[in-house]
Image: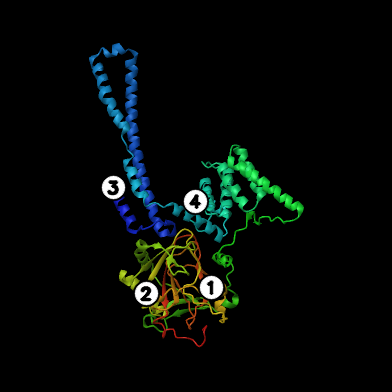
Amino acid sequence: MKPWLQLVFLTSVFLIWRAEAEFFTSIGQMTDLIYAEKDLVQSLKEYIRAEETKLSQIRSWAEKMDVLTSKSTSDPEGYLAHPVNAYKLVKRLNTDWLELENLVLQDTTNGFITNLTIQRQFFPTEEDETGAAKALMRLQDTYKLDPETLSRGNLPGTKYRSSLTVSDCFGMGKTAYNDGDYYHTVLWMEQALKQHDEGEDTTVSKVEILDYLSYAVFQFGDLHRAMELTRRLISLDSTHERAGSNLRYFEKLLEKEREKSSNKTVATTEPVVQNGAYERPLDYLPERDIYEALCRGEGVKMTPRRQKRLFCRYHNGNRNPHLLIAPFKEEDEWDSPHIVRYYDVMSDEEIEKIKQLAKPRLARATVRDPKTGVLTVASYRVSKSSWLEEDDDPVVAKVNQRMQQITGLTVKTAELLQVANYGMGGQYEPHFDFSRRPFDSTLKSEGNRLATFLNYKDEPDAFKRLGTGNRVATFLNYMSDVEAGGATVFPDFGAAIWPKKGTAVFWYNLFRSGEGDYRTRHAACPVLVGCKWVSNKWFHERGNEFLRPCGRTEVD
């Protein structure tokens, strides 16, 4: 294929699916960037070959003229005595040198620059780079990885090892700094400084690193260390005005602290340091520690007593005719609330077809604002998703029908099949699948423990416009294995379920009374290594009144 045809084809592929930036939210779409970069490398190599050919011609001309002028300058009159030499001198200066000038001025960059210009509009943006940096920090926090581990690329299950340079670490620190995140600023600037001190070649100066690091340390109230770092900066650059000003300011603050300490009027507070690092600040998520521990496989409350209540069996969908001969393998993942896993739900061929259908339609996954009911993107949900209808391909209808047969619930009132692909550090922090109703303080069931601090009285009915009631159940298909991370966890009761390609997990979000089971608050853990694909079907209340009738109590 001709280079310009390849370019047109590649551009067309980009235009088909790219409606916005945010490559970092989907590994599936980031793979296209690999091929785009490969195309640019080929274009660059063609430019280099053209430049080398051009320089070779110029070098040949120069060598020839060097020999000729050496001869002519040794005896100019004798040389020009020959009429042919005289003619050729005039011709060279009038024509040949002009041709050489045109050769030198010939622009061989056109093809490469044109290609680069066209493709640049499809490149990741500043938003992508920031998102990718924050994704690494998210992995760092969730899986308790120190900057050294990430910088050296020592991650489990990795096939291709890669490391971060001083410049990369410095960029991570700057991203955190610009976001007001001094905790990660300190960690990454320290790593950049460490690698710099080890002699790594870089264009980033120690002065630049120390400038950010000293101020971030000061933000933690560590005045002594801030002064130490600032003095080191000044020793490298005594003309650094901001550092000099900061040092004088720090010295004044330290003097005031000493006065207060000597007067014993105010107790000075030292910054909390754990394992040589400052304590990570608290954030908006109340169950952060529990959630992240489960993601690491810690704190799972699978006791021997509970384990004895879990079984494996063949499931025929309550004697569904389609499953009597070929039942599904069913395994209990948790007893209460009951969560089950089904094996061999989707074949590899079906999975690839679903991914093929979904990939061009992937868009940043959204969440519903609890106050306004409006769909919006959020930092706690990092993935891209698309919705598939049965008319899109027979395989969609086939998978939908299979989920109906397994669950015994109707898909007529269920939502479309949602397909999601998780990007760098892709996650969905703890959330409910069902729409919350005002919390009834008189309901003292175990399933409402989280509702005591999660107030949803102002949340609108998210599914009112559908007219199909609330989400009664979730059927989650795992369409890929994940080398590390990516578990589905339930912080309220301490369960962690790990992805297995071709399997699916199922649970009810509502009690038989229609009340929400708050124990089912769950999360998709950040993907540490790998590419996570899932699809899910949300079944709704309407149409299932007799398929799953009410119980005798409010929490049956």
x and y percent of residue 298 in the render? Answer: 58, 66
Q: Which residue is mark 4?
A: 162
Q: CA distance from mark 4 to mark 1?
A: 44 Å
x and y percent of residue 495 in the render? Answer: 54, 71
Q: Residues within 10 Å of mark 3 (few under 14, many from 20)?
A: few
Q: Amino acid at mark 2?
A: Asn
Q: Residue at x 32, y 23 (%)?
A: 65
Foreground pick, 305 / 202? 202
Q: Nearer the viewer, mark 3 or mark 1?
A: 1
x and y percent of residue 314 in the render? Answer: 45, 79
Q: Which residue is mark 2?
A: 400
Mark 1 and mark 4 in contact (Cβ < 8 Å)? Answer: no
Q: CA distance from mark 4 to mark 2?
A: 41 Å
Q: Who comes first in sequence, dot 4 or dot 2?
A: 4
Asked if residue 49 is positioned above or below residue 255 in the image, the reply reads: above
Give residue 4's mark. Answer: 3
Q: Who comes first in sequence, dot 3 or dot 4?
A: 3
Q: CA distance from mark 3 to mark 1?
A: 58 Å
Which residue is outermost to the bottom? Answer: 552
- The answer to whether any part of residue 247 appears in the image is yes
Q: Quadrant of residue 387?
A: bottom left
Q: Amino acid at mark 3?
A: Trp
Circle 1 — which element?
loop
Give residue 120's mark. Answer: none
Q: Who comes first in sequence, dot 3 or dot 1?
A: 3
Give residue 455's mark. Answer: 1
Mark 3 and mark 2 in contact (Cβ < 8 Å)? Answer: no
